[in-house]
Image (cartoon, coloured by chain):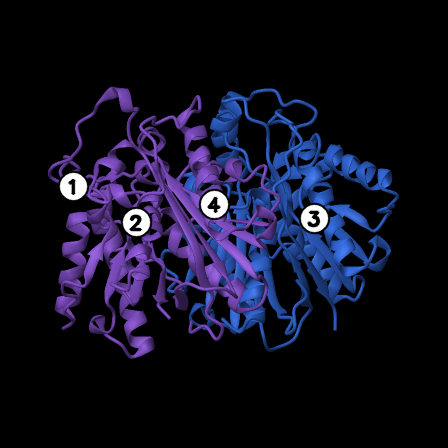
Chain colours: A purple, B blue
């Protein structure tokens, strides 16, 4: 979808935990906490606290109060998306709850951009989060159990990101938005999300290139969400097979957030918070410094649940994309 | 939000289970199944099958194929919304995943209407479902355990509904849409959802009346989603306290779906599928017959999870609304 009145990204903020601060993008966070509970009593409440703080910080940077927002698009990985619902319990702003797994930052940006472009809102926010400890115990094993992780596993980022968009003001603009289709190539290994999500990224990005008559060379940076090492390789291969070279301009947020080998993160970072924190920190900062002028941001999500995996189902993937342009 | 190009509801379909068929609206279903597994091996797969069949039926009634849809807005109550994701795995249509608990039919209609009104899509679908057995084992107790239900409990509908909207064509139109705020008045009893959600319905409906300069008497029918007996009473009281009489035109889908006493359903029906099935059957049929010309449809959702309740949290409520008008 090409937007007639491309909204501006007037502010953005991110927050991370200990590992995120120790990684190569440690300097690109608005706030870092060494306490994985973020001052709360449970990890779920910690995740809500992260969203609460990142929204407050983004609003502060925009010079706005919550009452200035016309709506918020938010979601997370927790059952019934309680990370978002409880963070927004005291925020009197119309709320659209989303579930797009790790593609949520993309889904939120797409819908916020449409709401603004269509004139339904003047100012809107998109927000999401993930937390290593809530995700591990919900999707895999209780953290204290210390189970061994296979080499294809990724490390769920303890992080949150929030983008404030407005019809007026200054800042990079979302000029195009793409809603992805579900793509499922039959991967059943819940420890190999990269492989499950790569075909969805291929589908959405191919459609984006085709619809806009462009190729990878037309963008300064193409960033997928959290395909990780293996998923990135698969995506590069899929494009190579169709005669398209993604090249050096293609990065994956899951490979940017951590020092994969130094921090022993196996295939890289994952979680809604991964792409949200990298986009709302490093990537938008690169745009502000003029190092990136055209950013194609395409977070991917794996729409499985522990129940679906136990019932032998494969993993449906999805990828939503936005094109962010300077000036 | 007042829509400049109000989209038409060109088709709608619903599907239900045994209890839904035995209730007072049994004749208002497109399809009823006596098999609570809907031909599948697990209840979760049954819920996906319901969504798959209701989408196919709605498309058939519209004379369209899936390829004619520009996007689908769908969600459900299951962890990670697998009811929707797995039903749409083989449907090559752009998919926005939603989590709005039992307000999902409302959230989907709001967003689909905005996408159409804004010109981002020509044809779109909104869909949701719930299943008594998946909800019971996820939120409360395994069904075979046969635990006693308190008098305030509601019965999760085994049902799904789908609406097809289009910029062109015939049928009632969505002329106004309202996105709700989260409202939490501190109810902590997860067996008393009606009380938790009623304040959200009050908030959204009050805002709707205020913004449009109307009152309950301006609508032929005002239908909340699944407040049930107690929640309905609370909403009537809240309006009475503010000097507004909802009157006989106000109904709750949770009280329409079942014969509450004859079927021993305690406070009535609940679940995303309740309002979805009543809207996409009985209510829209009443509009087609000219018995309702202006329908204010306002499904409510309780944004809790079993984890949040175990951690002592209260229940955040939300309510999204659309105004559907004939002619």
What is the spatial separation of the Cα atoms under label 1 and label 3, in whole angstroms? Answer: 47 Å
Q: Chain of mark 1?
A: A
> Which residue carries the number 3 mark?
B204
Q: Locate residue A29, reporting x and y percent.
A: 32, 43
Q: Residue at x 70, y 32 (%)?
A: B195
Picture residue at 27% right of the left edge, 69% below the top: A206
Q: Is residue A187 visible?
A: no
Q: Quadrant of the N terminus of chain A?
A: bottom left
Question: Are discs 2 and 3 less than 8 Å apart at CB?
Answer: no
| Chain letter of the residue carrying label 3 | B
State left or right for residue A66 relative to residue B259.
left
Residue carrying label 4: B47
Q: Residue furthest left?
A: A261
- Give the CA distance from mark 2 to mark 4: 36 Å
- Count of numbered circles on the image: 4
Q: Are marks 4 and 3 on the same chain?
A: yes
* In this view, the mark in front (2 or 4): 2
Q: Within the image, what quadrant is residue B10 found in?
A: bottom right
Cα distance, mark 2 to mark 1?
Answer: 14 Å
Residue that numbered label 1 is attached to: A259
Q: For mark 1, does the 10 Å Cα neighbourhood hold few (<14), some (14 to 19), or many (20 or more) residues?
A: some
Q: Which residue is mark 2?
A: A278
Q: What chain letter is assigned to the residue under label 4?
A: B
Q: Which is more foreground, mark 1 or mark 3?
A: 1
Whichever of callouts 2 and 1 sits on the residue coming sooner in the sequence is 1
Give the x, y percent position of residue A126: 46, 52
Q: How far separated are the C-alphas under marks 1 and 4?
A: 42 Å
The mark that comes first in sequence, 4 or 3, is: 4
């Amino acid at each position: 979808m090409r937007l007639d009145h491309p909204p501006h990204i007037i502010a953005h903020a991110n927050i991370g935990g200990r590992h995120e601060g120790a990684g190569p993008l440690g300097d690109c966070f608005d706030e870092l906490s060494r306490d994985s509970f973020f001052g709360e009593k449970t990890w779920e409440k910690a995740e809500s606290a992260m969203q609460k703080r990142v929204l407050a910080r983004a609003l502060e940077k925009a010079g706005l109060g919550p009452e200035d927002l016309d709506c918020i698009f938010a979601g997370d990985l927790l059952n019934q998306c309680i990370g978002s619902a409880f963070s927004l319990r005291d925020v009197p702003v119309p709320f659209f709850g989303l579930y797009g797994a790790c593609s949520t930052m993309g889904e939120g940006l797409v819908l916020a951009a449409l709401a603004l472009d269509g004139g339904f809102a003047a100012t809107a926010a998109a927000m999401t989060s993930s937390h290593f400890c809530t995700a591990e115990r919900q999707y895999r094993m209780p953290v204290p159990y210390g189970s061994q992780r296979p080499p294809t596993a990724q490390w769920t980022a303890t992080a949150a990101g929030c983008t404030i968009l407005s019809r007026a003001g200054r800042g990079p603009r979302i000029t195009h938005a793409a809603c992805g289709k579900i793509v499922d190539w039959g991967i059943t290994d819940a420890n190999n999300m990269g492989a499950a999500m790569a075909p969805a990224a291929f589908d959405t990005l191919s459609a984006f290139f085709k619809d806009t008559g462009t190729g990878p060379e037309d963008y300064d940076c193409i960033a997928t969400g959290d395909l990780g090492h293996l998923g990135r390789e698969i995506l590069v291969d899929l494009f190579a097979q169709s005669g398209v070279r993604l090249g050096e301009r293609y990065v994956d947020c899951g490979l940017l957030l951590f020092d994969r080998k130094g921090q022993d993160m196996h295939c890289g970072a994952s979680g809604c918070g991964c792409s949200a924190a990298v986009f709302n920190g490093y990537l938008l900062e690169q745009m502000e410094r003029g190092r990136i002028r055209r950013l194609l941001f395409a977070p991917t999500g794996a729409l499985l649940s522990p129940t679906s995996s136990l019932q032998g189902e494969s993993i449906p993937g999805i990828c939503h994309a936005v094109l962010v342009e300077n000036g």
